[in-house]
Amino acid sequence: MDHLVELRGRLVVCLVAFALAFILCFFFAGPIYIFLVRPFAAASAIYATNVGHHVSPLDLIFVTAGITPIPPTTEEAAQLIYTAPLEILFTKMKLAGFGAIFLAFPVLAFQLYRFVAPGLYRNEKGAFLPFLIASPLLFVLGAALVYFIMLPFVMWFSLSQQISSDTVAVALLPKVSEYLNLVTALVLAFGLCFQLPVVMTLLGLAGLISSKFMAEGRRYAIVAVVVVAAIVTPPDPISQLMLAVPLVILYEISIWCVRLIEMRRRTDDEAEATLAA
């Protein structure tokens, strides 16, 4: 019962933290959404001012990052629509919930750690904390890759598919809800996929996999990475490569992390054997 009472208390703290973060994000839902639309605005403005010309990838990245200003156009840089009366309200609520998870994550992670910490040995606590720090950092790295690189290219590619003639005009006018769905899906996909080193290192720490096994299965891992990239990204080769290449690099980093764990474990075993002798 003591454990259940403690669990209930920590769940209440997590719910309160999430609720406060939700209210805060909902209050600033407009500016947050404008911030998320900036990659589309950058791609739209650059496309409008460079129709028929080669667009440098660095231009898209620099404008999205705010290093260079958005090129002036004859109209708004980005135009989005909503077709249902309450669509914008529900979109703001979804955005607030998505942002609340980010803001409340430190509290959620701390409560999780405090709940499981009494059952861990000292060396297990020391091994658990680095992963608790590395996991959100890798997630933010994946989200940054989506925001500053992938989204501008995806939106610019979508704009380049527009059709215009004397009699027909096919223009891209994304809905506010569908654009947010695209952003959240990509952020979650990249953020979770970037947890690969954490997952692999934990498996290596538990002795379930070895660096030799991972190195020998590299070719199969690359095929799996390509398949995952094809499933979770929009159906264009640029987006798939933007996810597949970092994942392959992260897989190689995972091999080295597991190898370091094995070397440390081997050193500890040798030290214990020496002391026992």
Image (spheres, grey):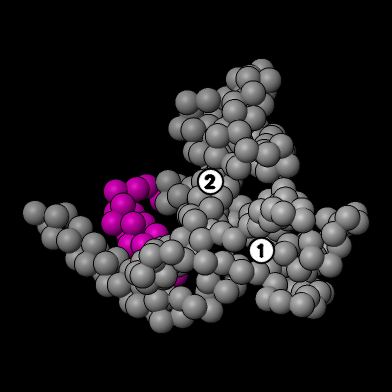
The residue that label 2 is drawn on is 189
> Left or right: where does residue 200 sit relative to residue 165?
left
- Residue visible at 49% across and 33% down? 203
Looking at the picture, does residue 45 appear above or below residue 28? above
What range is drawn magenta here? 102-122
Q: Residue 188: which disc?
A: none
Q: Could you say which is closer to the camera, residue 262 or residue 61?
A: 61
Looking at the picture, does residue 265 appear above or below residue 144? above
Specify few, some or many for label 1: CA neighbours under 10 Å numbering under 14, 14-19, or 20 or more: many
Is residue 151 in view?
A: no
Looking at the picture, does residue 71 appear above or below residue 211? below
Q: Amino acid at mark 2?
A: Ala
Looking at the picture, does residue 187 appear above or below residue 89? above
**Secondary structure state at the residue bearing disc 1:** helix
Is residue 165 shown in magenta? no
The residue that label 1 is drawn on is 40
- Residue visible at 59% across and 28% down? 227
Image coords of residue 23 (percent x, y)? 35, 78
